[in-house]
Structure formats: structure tokens, C-alpha cells
Amino acid sequence: MNNVAESFIGKNTPRSDGFAKVTGTMQYTSDIIIPGMMYGALLRSPHPHAEIISVDTSAAEAMGAVCLTYKDINPVVYNERSVSIPAATYRDRTVLPNKARHFGEPLIAVAADTEELAFKAVKAIKVDYKVLDAVYDPAEAMKPGAPELYKTIYLGDKRIDVQNNIGVVRNIDEGDCDAGFAKADRIFEHEFELERIYHNQLETKCATCKPEPDGSLTVWATAQSIHANRQLLGRILNMPLSKINVKKLPFGGAFGSSIQVNTVTPICACLAMKAGRPVRLTSAREEDFYSHQKYPALFTVKMGVTNDGIITAAHVKALIDFGAHQVQPLPFMGCTAGWFASLYRYEGNIRFDGTAVYTNKTPCCAMQGYGNPQINFAIESMIDIIAEEMNFSPVDFRLKNYRGVGDEFWGQGPTIRSIIKSCGVEQSLVEGREKTDFDNRALPHEKTGVIRRGIGLARGFHTSGTAGPKEGEVIDYSSATIKINEDGSVDLLTPVTDHGGGTWDALKKITAEVLQVPLDMVGLSPAETMNTGYDVCTHATRGVYCGGAAVYHVAMKVKERLLEFAGRLMAEHHYNLEVMRNDELRQSVVRVKNFPSKFMTVGDVARQAQIMSWGTMAYTDSYRQRNCPPCFTTHFVEVEVDTRTGIISIPKVLIYGDCGVAMNPDLVKGQLVGSFNRGYGYTVYETMPLDENTGALKNNGLLVDYKTPTAMEMPRIENVEVVLCDTYEPSGPFGAKGIGEAALASVQAAITNAVYNAIGIRFHKLPITPEVVLKALKNKEQEAGK
Amino acid sequence: MSMHEITIKVNGKPRRLAVKSNELLLNVLRDKLFMTGAKYGCGIAECGACTILKDGKSVMSCLVPAVAADGWDITTPEGLADGGTLSHVQQAFIDHAAIQCGFCTPGMVVASTALLNENPDPDEEYVRDYLRGNYCRCTGYVAMVSAVLDAAQRMKAE
């Protein structure tokens, strides 16, 4: 028993759900089929703003359909997103409204025996509307006399009058900005704007709800948090939580769109309860476009800089158009302020003035980064602007000012902060500058020809989880149950969901590493709300760092019991025992330290414990992390701008990711490459203009008119290089922190900085479609001609 | 609406079905045959999540009326593996970490199989171009292109 098995933490292992995924046998929410199931369909608002005067569902009901309107539902006013504490949560919506506030808002729901009949029943419903004026622009919405979306809403239990459609104002002031600006040699101020985009997760939002004979309800829903779904349904249906069971399933992408309880889920639950039969409600793609979108943003950024390259103060003003319902712009703005505050030191002098406004558009929610890609684009553009104007190297200017080890990081707005303990920024910038010969890049005016090549960089990060030393506005803890079976295999039960980045495999690895069992001897148990403790949500890049920490904590408790039982069986003090993996036996063995021939397999310990009726070696607990370490990224992007067409292509990219110890390096790299693709779309293609006459999207919710980069537009295999930084996060399970959302943060500015290097034009607004680029090139030419 | 009796060979087995003239092949596969490997993503043949093989060539099943598929020989994602043994394309997708959420994976694997049926020795450009009709929001495609090129090598080595 001398052989020491190699750890699989930090090693590539084939994903355990791979077989199911490549054979099409993985079961997603939209694959749930229940005998006797009815099909749901929604009547969605044809107006951007309208009161419902009357509804006549008699013709639909005559066809056999079950109909649900605002009159049928319990008028609980809620926010779909519940990761913030109640006192920091605005509430403005019900399951179905009596007033439409955006085009495509669900107003009436039906269930019928077939999908076809459900659609026909929707068409047979008669609704009389009083059409109201709509407002789409946040600045217009704040003017006196603008159409009013709400008169009152709630903050926690407090009733609030809404003035001028202003949903949330959030101002944060730290240090002394005025003194900081007074100290600066130069002041810079610029505006940056980012449009709404759509998550475009491949599985559209879906729910299936089944009333059970004992009066309880079973729910399958596209969800990043099963417990958030259960708790909200309990409030809406006025049922004990023990009567609502939400199943954990994989989902076909989310990118933040299912942090909140999806709009269709409570509707489906209410339909099923009314019908007394199982109901499935799936969104068509053209409906899903109207469920949630990414927050747009308009920023004014002001920075003061000394001649020796120290940023002495920074002030960001933000105007956020969040649409028709609050899916928490309050924490969104807090987080945006936090990402801004944590990028550079600014000598501690920061100010953030944020205003978030209701408009008659689809509600906005988190989408990979929660304000981070937005503000990163502004700040990282600003850094390049300043570096050029003041003749600093973009790399050195960043190195001089970034927040790194020992500095404070705001993981989730001003109330969640911790000290940075691991940081890959320096490695990324220094290595990347050499690999790309960045310092010798040609300047824009030195370039000629119809196709101009440029290189740019930007750096970013995201938090790992939302926990700090002190609890704040956001709830953060996770739970796990682990038990050792009588053959030495292990069951892991966790409420944590997996976006597909490999979180579940990482949790299995953590379990296997602590208990030293072979990886394939750890089974992931089917999880649902009735058999798991609470986990807030797989959001904020917290799956491995926070969910994994709970698994680590519980596994350590199971290990204690294992050593205690083994000690009793082997007549040794448990301090003298150690647990080692033995791949030949396909078991973990407990052996006496320095006396390796005296050992028992874990299976033998479990079997003996059973025979002697000592019990099962199992443990359940919740665990809260006490830090929110940033995971850093840096992007070096090469672009080619065709000055005849305005088309931007990306022949080459170098990506640095700092996730601490990678649980599965290839899956981490995959997330970085996938995020690069989404950032490419966000920067160059994705836009969703609105028809202001109807309030409808001009693409009508059709994918064919929502361009994203395909396999064709990505750089070739040999030109995509991903480097994982050599870091270890002391507060993470086996040195791990997150990567998911960080992977997107700096893509946008890296591309626009590269475009600037190619053609000498600074873009302050995304996306930079070929039309935008061509127009800017023409303007530049005309100005040069003057 | 009138019903039609059709016979489709699905993964080697003939299946007789009664379908309405407005029923789509994708929905028949999923809701009547309970083969949910082919997915709904857009309903307008823009995303490729519903890709199946007809006589070894790729077809988007969301646009095919089931009556039009009478007499077809089709392969769904469930039919690519030989029992517990994955096809080269399937195995390469796992080995190259070309999978994340997995929702596009069945369609992507089917389309890649069709690609290699048509051209067993593709270069990178060919694969990139062929897969442009299959949408993936998670991976950024690069690992998928590597997987298909590797699968071609594995097939040649066989």
C-alpha cells in the first residue's frame, strides 16, 4: 500500500455527462413528457403599453381549453430574482398583469390537450385594450408628462411612489473625489454606450408542472436555482414549501437568464393547479426574445491622472434603461460600481451616480457579468485613451494602477468586499506583451492599404461568488450531502446547478480528492428541493468556489467519521490514520501513518460499520464562503478592418485566464473561448432595434435576424491561444476560484482598442457593425480633407 | 385535419405512425416517438439543434412536415452510437472538450457526421464553413472544429 495515486485536481478528465450529451439522451426541461400532460400557450401583449379593459375567454373554454387571467391569480407582488435580501429587493410584478407594459408581455395563459388546440384557443380569446402612450428612451421617460409605467411599487415591505419612471437611484461616494481630481495634472471625460442584447441560450425557457394526488406540486423548470423557484411558487400558490418540489435538471444555456424564476414558470404552475393536470409551457424562440435581455448602459466616465501616471480619482455616471419590470437594477448598479471601483486603485477616490429607469421594453436581467462587460468596456477604453494622450505604455499604465494582492475587491457591490489573495494580472500583462510584441506594434497613422491590421488589449475580472467576511445585501451559502456506500463508492447530493462549464464534475472531483476515492466511484445523486439544503443560485461565478466549498466542508466531516470508524476497527487512534486512493483496488484505503501495510479499504470500513450497526458515514450541512476572490482575464486581440466594407474580422487572439487551480483545464479554456465568441458578437454584431410604432423588435424575435459569430468568423484553431495563470487561491477548494463571467469582461474593449490601433478611430458605442465603421471612416476622411 | 399513415425507418427500425398533415417531423420524433435527442431551438432552420440524418445527409427536422418524411430512412442523435460504443465524432467531441451545456451537441454531432459522410478528409476551412449553420452559444466552436478534424483522422486510421 505504498503507491500514492496522482491527484486529478488540475488535470483534464473527460466530462461525466459527455456520453449523455453526445447521444442526445441528456434530459433537459424541454424534454420532460408526462402522460396526460396538457400544452400551455400564452397570449402576449400586441401593445407596448395598454390597460386591459375586458377579457372574454368563453370561446377558448368552449374548445376545451383552461384559461388563466389576472383575475385567477393570487395578487402577490414579487420580484422574479431573489438572490438579494428582501430589504434590498424592489417588487413590482404579479404572475399575470392587468396592464401590459411591454410588447410581448404574457397577459393570458391557456392549457389544452394539444399544442395546436392551445394556439387556437389563444386566438379565440377576445381582449379589449385601452392603448396608452409608450416610452422607450430612459432620458425621455424621466421627463415630466412622460407615460407612467407604475404609480407604486415596493422595496422590501415599504410601499414606494414612483416619480418620473425612476426605478432606482444608487449613489456611492468613497474617499475624496474632489481632492483627487484637484491633485491630477490632466482630467479626462468620455461617454460610453452599450445596447441591449439577448442571451440567446439555445434552450428556450420552459416549465412543466404536475399536481400530485396529495395536493403537492412537482416542477421541472429551466432554472439556475431550484430553491428560488420553490420559494417563489410557495408564496404565489400560498402552499407550504414541503408541498412544492422543484427538480434539478441541466439547462441548455442560461448566461444569467434563469437566475430569476422565469416568467413562464409561475404561469405554468398556476395553469396546472387550475387544470388539475400536468402542463408543459415552452417558449417559442420569438417569445423568448421578449422574456429577458441584457442591461444596456450609458456611462460618463471622468478620471484624473498625474503626469507620472497615477490615477487619482474617478467618477462614473450611469443611466440604465431596465425595461418594464425590475429584475434588480439596484444590485446591478451596486455591482457595476464595484467592478469599476475594483479595476484600478484611483487612490481610493471614487464616485458612482447611477439612475435606473422604467421603459416600455422587455425587462433586463443579468447576462454573464452583471454590469461587468458594460463598465469594463468604458474603463478599459478610457485607460487606452489616457495612455495614448499622455504617452504611457498601455501595459505599464495598467500595471501601475491595477488592484492586486493585498488590495480590496468588491465582489458584489459596496456591501460585499474582501482582500485579494491571488492574482494573475502581472503574469498576463507581462507575458502577453512579450508574446505579441505589443510594445512594438505599429501606430494607426503608420498603416496603409485597404485592410488595416491592429492589435489591442484589455484586462478584466469577475468575482467568485458573493460572500464576504460580513454578510451584505446578497445571500450566499450552499449545501451538500455526502455519504459513503457499503462498497466504498460515494454519493454526492448538491442543489448546485451546472451551466455546462463542468461545475458538477468539479464538485465530484472535490469529493473524490478529500475522500481519496477514484473519480468514477463518486455518483451525483438526482437532486430536488425536497432532498437538498438551500443554495442561492449558480450565478456570480460561484459554482466551484462557493458550491465547491460546501462540498469540501461536508466531505471533510465525512472523512472525520471515516477515520473514527476505521480507528475503532483497526484499534488505532484516528490521528494516526490517513486516507489514500488506491487505483488498483478502485478504492480509497485507510492506513496507519508510517505503517502502510496496516490498512482497510473504505468499503470494508463501511461494511463493518453496517454489520456492527454503527450507522452510515454521511453528513449534511450548509457552508458560507468568507471571501469573494476575483478571477482575472486579459485579452490580446488582433483585428483586421476592411476599409472598403467596414467589416471587422479577428484573425488571432491570446487569452489569459486566472481561475486559481483549474479543476479541469480544458473546460476552463473552453469557457474562455466561448466567452470570446459572445464578446465578439456583443462588440461587432449584436443589436436589437425596436419599431417605435409597435414596440416590437424589428427582428420579430427571429434568430435569422440576430447575427452572432459562427464557426466561420472565429479565428482558426492555431490562432486561438489560451493560457491559464499559475495561481493558487488560498480560500478556495484546492486553490480554485471561478472563471465563468470573468471570461467575457475584457473582450469588448480589447476588440475596440485593437480597432483603434488599426484605423485610428475610437468607438464609444457598441456594437460597431460594418455600417458604423464605414460611416466613421467616411467622417474621418472628410475631416482630414477639410 | 386529415390523418396520414406514414412509415419511417428510424435508427434502423421501421416505425408506422398516424400524423396530421401539419405536424412537423421534429415534433413527431419528440412527442410521439419520445426521441428527444433532436432539439427545438428556433423552429426556422436557423440553429441546427434539430438536425437529423436522411440517408446519411443532414436535414433540419423542424421544417419537414412528417407526411413528407414517409418512406425516409433517418438517423437521430440517439442512433449514432453502436450500443455503448460511441462513434468517432461523438468520442472526439468528448475528448476535445467541445461540449458545454450540451443542448446544441446532438445536432452538432449529427451535422458533423453528415460532413464526414460527404467529405472524409476535410480541411479546417471546410469544417468551419459546414458547421456555420449550427448554432452554439457556449463553446465558440473552435473545440468542435478540432473534434471533427480529429474524428476524420480516427476514421482514416481505422
Image (cartoon, rainbow, N blue to C red):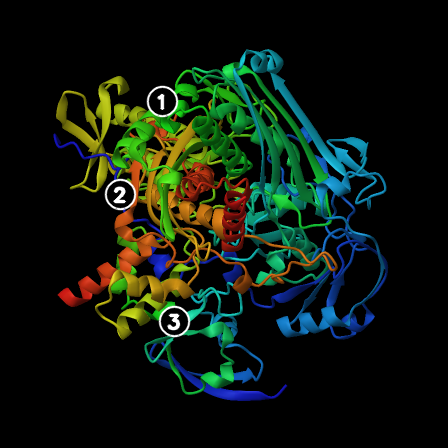
Q: Which secondary structure, mark 2? A: loop
What amino acid type is highlighted by mark number 2? Answer: Asn
Q: Position of residue A435 (x, y in %)?
A: 26, 35
| Chain for disc number 3 | B
Q: Position of residue A208 (x, y in %)?
A: 59, 58
Check residue B76 in the rendering and tell me which mark sits there, or answer none: 3
Q: Is residue A20 above or below residue A348?
A: below
Q: Which residue is mark 2?
A: A12
| Chain for disc number 2 | A
Q: Which residue is mark 1?
A: A730
| Residues marked 1 and 2, same chain | yes
Residues under numbered marks 1 and 3 in contact, where contact means CB atoms less than 8 Å apart? no
Q: Which secondary structure, mark 1? A: loop
For the point 27% across and 45% down, which residue is it? A13
Q: CA distance from mark 1 to mark 3?
A: 47 Å
| Chain for disc number 1 | A
Seen from the viewer's position, the closer of residues A490 and B24 is B24
What amino acid type is highlighted by mark number 1? Answer: Pro
| Residues marked 1 and 3, same chain | no
For the point 66% across and 30% down, which residue is it? A354
The N terminus of chain A: image quadrant: top left
Q: CA distance from mark 1 to mark 2?
A: 22 Å
Q: Is residue A21 above or below residue A472?
A: below
What amino acid type is highlighted by mark number 3? Answer: Thr
Q: Which secondary structure, mark 3? A: loop
Q: Position of residue A217 (x, y in %)?
A: 63, 52
Sequence-first disc among 1 and 2? 2
